[in-house]
Image (cartoon, rainbow, N blue to C red):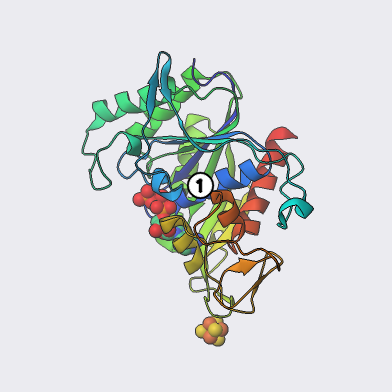
Amino acid sequence: MSLENIQHIVLVLSGKGGVGKSSITTQLALALSLQGRSVGVLDIDLTGPSIPRFFGIEGAKVKQAPGGWVPVSVHDAQPAVPSSENGQAPRSGSGLGSLRCMSLGFLLGNRGDAVVWRGPKKTAMVRQFLSDVQWGALDYLLIDTPPGTSDEHISLVETLLKQTSPGQVAGAVVVTTPQAISIADVKKELNFCKKTGVTVLGVVENMAGFVCPSCAECTNVFSKGGGEVMATEFSVPFLGSVPIDPMFVMLIEEGKRPVYPKGTAVNGKNVEENGTATDGNQEHNRDEGLLVEKYMSCSLHPIFDGIVRQLVTRLEG
Ligand SMILES: Nc1ncnc2c1ncn2[C@@H]1O[C@H](COP(=O)(O)OP(=O)(O)OP(=O)(O)O)[C@@H](O)[C@H]1O
Ligand code: SF4
């Protein structure tokens, strides 16, 4: 069975579309990979599969093997790199874990192909995605779900629980934004988890403030802290607050290294004339290198790293 060698399956949920669920999924996957874990991302947001674009692998072809679909590799596992060898900050002691992805997006002709399937066809496709992807051994599988709490979601959770051993589905990370409407929708999502018996691993509040591209000052545009208040109300962990960062949009939408203003220090590297971060003797080209290295140069990286550390501590003890 395709899920049997996966240690921890984590659902990423949101009550409402557009709150950044897919972006958070990709960043959590990169952060887990940087902490040496082998990671799979399953994108079953059939109405708008955006994960391949966020990983910069849109257009990749999925291969069929005798046992099912072979997921697309974002990057392979790599051993730890001491900082003296490449001039960069050392990766975690355990190196870089492999990162694979499967998405309906790979099976669609082009980005604009809307998926207008109705209930039974969608449910059948989700079942196939859960049973027919040859993930191999993984530490984590993150599942990016469609927004909401419809019958489709109940059917998804039921199918998942049927196909896995007890405890394999670790729980759900619930993404919200500070606006009242999104928080109200997330309350529904928390009740949905209670009803379906899925543990809530925690709440992430996205787009809580705005990081100025000129001075990196973060201004709380909306009332910050709603996600934390809600998490306390429901007695679930609050995992962290992620501001809106225009650099992040560039990174995630174009897969490009963010350009920082001259004089800023980004992860200990100085930003020079052309806006790219350098380590003093080696310039990192904007489009070169692993996605994970681009990710590390984004100001939001420490936040996702912190969220993942909390999850890992909880799930791995
Ligand atoms: N913290 C952030 N800072 C800046 N931009 C962000 C942030 N989070 C998300 N975005 C941007 O917001 C847009 C919507 O994000 P995303 O697609 O992740 O939302 P979603 O909840 O998965 O939406 P849907 O449910 O429709 O799939 C994307 O363009 C993404 O780049
Ligand atoms: S945050 Fe700083 S740089 Fe940005 S607009 Fe305000 S004062 Fe100017």
Quadrant of the snapshot with the C terminus: top right
Q: Position of residue 212 (x, y in %)?
A: 53, 76
Q: Position of residue 110 (x, y in %)?
A: 26, 43
Q: Position of residue 8 (x, y in %)?
A: 60, 30
Q: Which quarter of the picture shows residue 118?
A: top left
Is residue 245 in view from this perspective?
no
Tell whether circle 1 marks a residue whose Cβ is less than 8 angstroms from ligand 1: yes
Give the camera-side residue of 132 and 199: 132
Q: Position of residue 261 (x, y in %)?
A: 56, 77
- Compared across the picture, whether 153 is left or right of 299 comes to left
Seen at 44% across and 64% down, the residue is 179
Determine the secondary structure under disc 1. helix
Say how many tags the image has. 1
View quadrant of ligand 1:
bottom left
Q: Residue furthest front?
A: 281
Type of amino acid under label 1: Thr
Seen at 58% across and 52% down, the residue is 231
Q: Which residue is mark 1?
A: 26
Give the camera-side residue of 88 and 28: 88
Seen at 52% across and 21% down, the residue is 3
- Neighbor class of circle 1 (other Cα within 10 Å; few <14, some 14-19, many 20+) is many
Give the camera-side residue of 47 and 284: 284
Seen at 68% across and 35% down, the residue is 315
